[in-house]
Image (tube, rainbow, N blue to C red):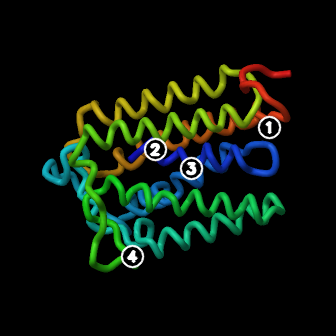
Amino acid sequence: MFIGHFAPAFIAAAVTPDRPRLGAMFIAAQLVDWGFFALAAIGVERMRIDPAASVMVPFDLYHMPYTHSLVGAGIWAAAFLGIVGIHRRDLAVGLLAGLVVLSHWLLDWLVHVPDLTIDGTPPKFGLGLWNYPTVAMPLELLLTLGAFAFYIRRTRGPAGPPLVLLGVMLLFQLVNWFAPHPQSAGLFLYLQALVAFAVLTVMAAWVGENRWFRKRGGLALSAQ
């Protein structure tokens, strides 16, 4: 799953008690993947390319105990909860951010073949929807578009920035699905992923700075 991970970010940003902070929630949504690719770049966690790994994704994610175990994800979530809570001086916002971090493991559980763990050791978990593209693809789009619509309905602001963000997200997802897969795992692949996360996060921060909560009925389509 790629852009589907941002669905909880849209929802959390839409229900925060202050101005929507979509950039921070986008970081939360992919925080454990930020961690994974950074750790993979220095050899702490590991993956390899295996065309037989699943129908959709040729990644054999065979060693990622610090980011994609449930305990590991919980630690990342707790750390981000503390950072956001202290920075914003608001425990509720920190808790929302922490839950978004933790949602990553749960969404991965839906699509990954069994490569997720509870504490970094077997057994491994994953429903394996990556082996069923006709289920996994619509699910990802449904999650993303549904959460995006919820965010738009809950906030006000110019229509342009969120639509640009959504367009870039969909473009990245199409590349993720249909572009030729890499022949081997390595630093270039890891940096590609990190750059993609960074681009979407910067755009989300831009969107969040131009949105605010609506006080009465009407769609969030124009600034006032």
- On the image, the x and y values in percent for residue 109 come to 36, 60
Which residue is labeled 3 in the image?
Answer: 8
- Which numbered dot is residue 118? 4
Q: Quadrant of residue 147?
A: top right
- Measure the alpha-carbon separation of dots 4 and 1: 38 Å
Q: Amino acid at mark 4?
A: Ile
Count the marks: how many? 4
Which residue is labeled 2 in the image?
Answer: 4
Please, what secondary structure does the residue beneath circle 3 have?
A: helix
- On the image, the x and y values in percent for residue 38 come to 45, 58
Q: Which residue is outermost to the front?
A: 217
- Measure the alpha-carbon separation of dots 4 and 2: 22 Å
Please, what secondary structure does the residue beneath circle 1 have?
A: strand
Q: Are marks 1 and 3 in contact (CB under 8 Å)?
A: no
Which residue is labeled 1 in the image?
Answer: 213
Local crowd at mark 2 within 10 Å, few (<14), some, or many (≥20)?
Answer: many
Local crowd at mark 3 within 10 Å, few (<14), some, or many (≥20)?
Answer: many
Earlier in the chain: of badge 1 and badge 3, it is: 3
Q: Amino acid at mark 1?
A: Phe
Please, what secondary structure does the residue beneath circle 4 have?
A: loop
Local crowd at mark 1 within 10 Å, few (<14), some, or many (≥20)?
Answer: many
Earlier in the chain: of badge 4 and badge 1, it is: 4
Identify the residue at image location x=33%, y=38%. Answer: 137
- Drawn side of residue 88 relative to residue 189, left or right: right
